[in-house]
Amino acid sequence: MNLINFWLSHRPEMLVALAQHVVLVLAATATAIAIGLPLGIVAARKPRLGAPLLAFTNIVQTVPSLAMFGFLVAVPLIGGVGARSALIVLILYGLLPVMRNTVAGIQGIDRAVRNAGVAMGMTARQLLLQVELPLAMPTIVAGVRVAAVVGVGAATIAAAIGAGGLGDFIFRGLSMTDPTVILAGAVPAAVLALAVDAGLGWLERVLTPGAARHRRLTFRAAAAGIIALMVVVAGGFALSGRWGTRVIIGSKNFTEQVILGELLAQAVERATDLRVDRRLNLGGTFISEEALRAGAIDAYIEYTGTALTAIFHQPTSRDRAEVYSRVAAAYAESGRTVLPPLGFNNTFAILVRTADARRLGLKTISDVVPHAPKWKAAFGYEFLEREDGYKGLVRTYGLRFAEPPRVMDLTLIYRALASGAVDLIAGDATHGLIKGLDLFMLEDNRRYFPPYDAVPVVRTQTLAAHPELRTAIERLAGKISEETMREMNYDVDVRRRDASAVVREFLDRLGS
């Protein structure tokens, strides 16, 4: 019932996500057919040329999809953030089954049939179009069937780079550790995959020799299916506001960022006539930054300390005003504008279980040093690599752990600490699970971490085109305290409330 209620309350959003997913899969599969079919024909007729082509597609198939997406995001001229990278990856994954089955279908034709065509005076082109392709078609469709089903699954991962689709709900649910939201995206994706598989399986059977009497029915059904898909796609994109003036709001892939992205979106919708597209759960800092730089999004919330060290690679500072000034200047040089801070400082928090803090008398990070050699630690991917992360922390405090720290996703790290799987983590000072799981935040007594004031970062070009956008966002300046942000996070993470509802209530109280 929770899942059904979620679908009913998010009908427009679900329709948009389904439309995006269908478009991605249809476009990628059609392109894979357009490229893979001719290459398969060449490979079947000229095996020496076909061997390296098939070897290339085999190699592509072995690369994990997430790694492929990450590579293309880092090469903006080819991919970048958004649907373009997703299409490239899905096309590459679709090539192998289409090419391999085209080769198998053509090479599997009885030589006597081919010889009969030649004896009748058929040219090579006539032989291909009138004999080989019709006889190979069931095998080719089987390859298309595999490519399409793989595309439906891989397209869910594309949500991590801002391509939209049903994966948005899966990543949102993972960030909130909410099974209902995960299933809200996973179940339609599974149904879509089954429908695609069944439909193409039917077509494969109909195209098998001896099934000609069913073809008229199949074509009518296919036409009806295409029309239905077009209605879904058109309706989804109409609801998404793609027609008309719009701005695109992004966020990183954890609860607070989803809330802040929703906060920006609703603030703009309330104060302006602009249509807002949401690109939430984009991934970590670097994907969100690249999305903004490339124009795939118009605005998102960043943290000043993160921008200073992780994006612009400048030396840290403990002065909040200085950090803000340096970050604003650095963004301005690359066509982005930093608006006034929202009011809270979400610094890194070194966390332990409250029971351990009481038992051992822990108050500061320095107090952990004697106990650390017996403890296990876990940190997020970014924290281990950043200048203001793990390496500087252990150097500043002289920390040594029982084993190298585990690398864990931020959505799981708090629960790993609470369950006893690890003994110390680096989290966010405003995270709702600190209260929800009874965790204790140690004081950064050596002031290692720089300030992390939450600030809206907007493309300067977008602000120039829509001055009302600045006014709408600046109404939020200084209005969110650490306690307020922690409470909103708690509502979403622990009370399982919808982020949009939590934001709506906050803005109602604010009078915005």
Image (cartoon, rainbow, N blue to C red):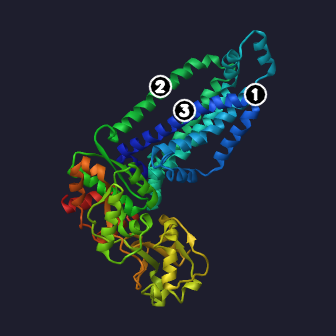
Nearer the observer, disc 1 or disc 2? 1
Q: Where the C terminus falls, by quadrant?
A: bottom left
* 375 is higher (above) or lower (below) than 121: below
- Circle 3 residues within 10 Å: few <14, some 14–19, many ≥20: some
Looking at the image, is mark 1 or mark 2 earlier in the sequence?
1
Q: Quadrant of residue 375?
A: bottom right
Whether residue 180 can be seen here: no
Q: On the picture, is 343 further left or further right than 230? A: left
Q: Quadrant of residue 252?
A: bottom left
Residue 104 position in % (x across, y down): 73, 31
Residue at 30%, 70% (x, y): give it: 344
Label 1 is placed on what type of residue? Gln
Looking at the image, is mark 1 or mark 3 earlier in the sequence?
3
Residue 436 position in % (x across, y down): 40, 72
Q: On the picture, is 149 further left or further right than 468? A: right
Residue at 52%, 80% (x, y): give it: 394
Residue that carries the numbered disc 1 in the rendered image: 107
Q: Quadrant of residue 491?
A: bottom left
Residue 186 position in % (x across, y down): 50, 49
* 432 is higher (above) or lower (below) than 274: below
Residue that carries the numbered disc 2 in the rendered image: 224
In whole angstroms, how far apart are the C-alphas of marks 1 and 2?
Answer: 34 Å
Label 3 is placed on what type of residue? Ala
In whole angstroms, how far apart are the C-alphas of marks 2 and 3?
Answer: 18 Å
